[in-house]
Amino acid sequence: MPISRISMGSVVDASQPEALKAALAEFISMLIFVFAGEGSGMAFSKLTDSGSTTPAGLISASLAHAFALFVAISVGANISGGHVNPAVTFGAFVGGHITLLRSILYWIAQCLGSVVACLLLKLSTGGLETSAFALSSGVNVWNAVMFEIVMTFGLVYTVYATAVDPKTGDIGIIAPIAIGFIVGANILAGGAFDGASMNPAVSFGPAVVSWSWDSHWVYWLGPFVGSAIAALVYELFFISPSTTHEPLPIADY
């Protein structure tokens, strides 16, 4: 049972140089991701006179986030695991793959990376607004929570299937690509409704810099719930010691 493997960890372990280096890697990866993702929306708005909410703007956001996440995960994978998302870290914690104290260290680093990225964007664009995530007209908070739960479930399930599962073998090489693709696809699905965050830190940075907190809790509750469900489902059905499934031979696909 994954719950039985949950560990609090110790302050000594969380303060080791390796843990601090991992946190720094998460900070840098998040900075890279948010600067490119949020920055692409700001650039599109500038070029199209606030046209980022158009279909073309949605496609632009999807591609920018998919590409940037692929890079951010790749550069951090060998140091911190390349979580680049508090929800992914929470899913790893629920599955017993990271301690609570190290998770908290990651969450702080991820949120700081997002805030710094947004501050750098504001400074480098001459004070343009880093728009916080918000619900679209006709979308209530529970609609948005459900969107975030389902989208983050898909994201964290993909993380488990391509990066966490010990049986991944060579498929682990394409993990950053698959994770970037599911985020890009989910932005196309949910972006018009609630912005399709799937990542509390990505929502946190713009909210801090623009000081806009309307329905901000949605972007924490939804991703954390979706992440926990994905972690439990994958752990119980596909990683649990009682599970004996064998990967199909290539010829069977």
Image (spheres, rainbow, N blue to C red):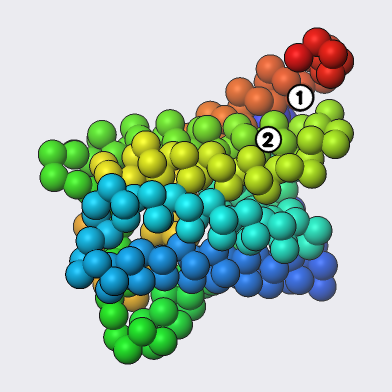
Nearest the viewer among 11 and 155 is: 155
Q: Is residue 155 visible?
A: yes
Give the amino acid type for the residue marked by disc 2 in the picture. Tyr
Q: Is residue 50 above or below residue 233?
A: below
**Callout 1: helix, strand or loop?**
helix
Question: Can you give x and y, in whole percent of width and height, for residue 158 in the image?
Answer: 62, 35
Secondary structure category for the residue under label 2? helix
Give residue 239's mark. 1
Give the side of residue 116 with respect to residue 51, left or right: right
Q: Are marks 1 and 2 in contact (CB under 8 Å)?
A: yes
Quadrant assignment, res 202: bottom left
**Crowdedness near tag 2: few (<14), some (14–19) or many (≥20) residues, C-alpha within 10 Å:** many
Mark 1 crowdedness (10 Å alpha carbons): few <14, some 14-19, many ≥20 = many
**Left or right, residue 23 beside residue 205:** right
Choose the circle earlier in sequence order: 1 or 2: 2
Quarter of the figure with the N terminus: top right
